[in-house]
Amino acid sequence: EVYILNNKNKGFTLAEMIISVAILSVVSIYILQMFLATKNLSIKSYEIDKSLRISKNIIELISAGQGIENSEDALLSKMRFEDGAYKLDFDSNFDLANENNKLYTMTMSIKKEDGLNQIDIEFTRLKPYIMKNESNVQISSVSSTKRIQ
């Protein structure tokens, strides 16, 4: 009987493993960046939708004759007047916030001229997005001119 001995091991060498781990690391960085960009876009979309809905509701209430000082609406009655504009703070769910948990600020100005209300509403994000450095980012800005009723 003849036995042939083959000493060649089957498997990966250390160099092959190091190269594959390096390639996997580089690819995973780009995948992580895509996930973070997608997360930020999702957050921005949510913020735009909620801020525009709130802006529309406020404009409709004011156009219908609701006064800010004597309103029964929760949003209008909670507005504070600072620096020549009305302001409200919101948390991450766009519920009214206090000083500790505010993430968004709404600023509204009203100008009355010639029987028209010029209403300008702006929403600002106070804290930066994931992996971003910018704070105080404008989310939405709405302007409306309505006839005073």
Image: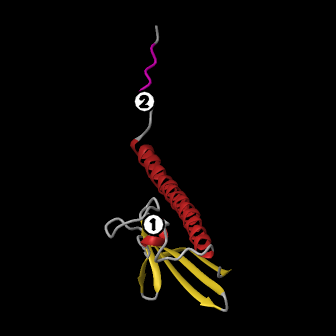
Which residue is situated farthest in the top direction here? 1
Tell me if I can see residue 104 in this picture: no
Nearest to N terminus: mark 1 or mark 2: 2
Q: Is residue 7 magenta?
A: yes
Vertical relation: 18 (above or below) 124? above
The region drawn magenta spans 3-8
Q: Position of residue 12 (x, y in %)?
A: 44, 37
Q: Residue at x 61, y 69 (%)?
A: 56
Q: Position of residue 130 (x, y in %)?
A: 44, 63
Q: Which mark is residue 10?
A: none
Instruction: Kindly identify which numbered label has been placed on residue 9.
Output: 2
- Label 2 CA crowd tier, 10 Å (few <14, some 14–19, many 20+): few
Quarter of the figure with residue 141: bottom right
Q: Nearer the viewer, mark 1 or mark 2?
A: 1
Q: Which residue is mark 1?
A: 129
Residue depicted at 65% across the width and 79% down the height: 149
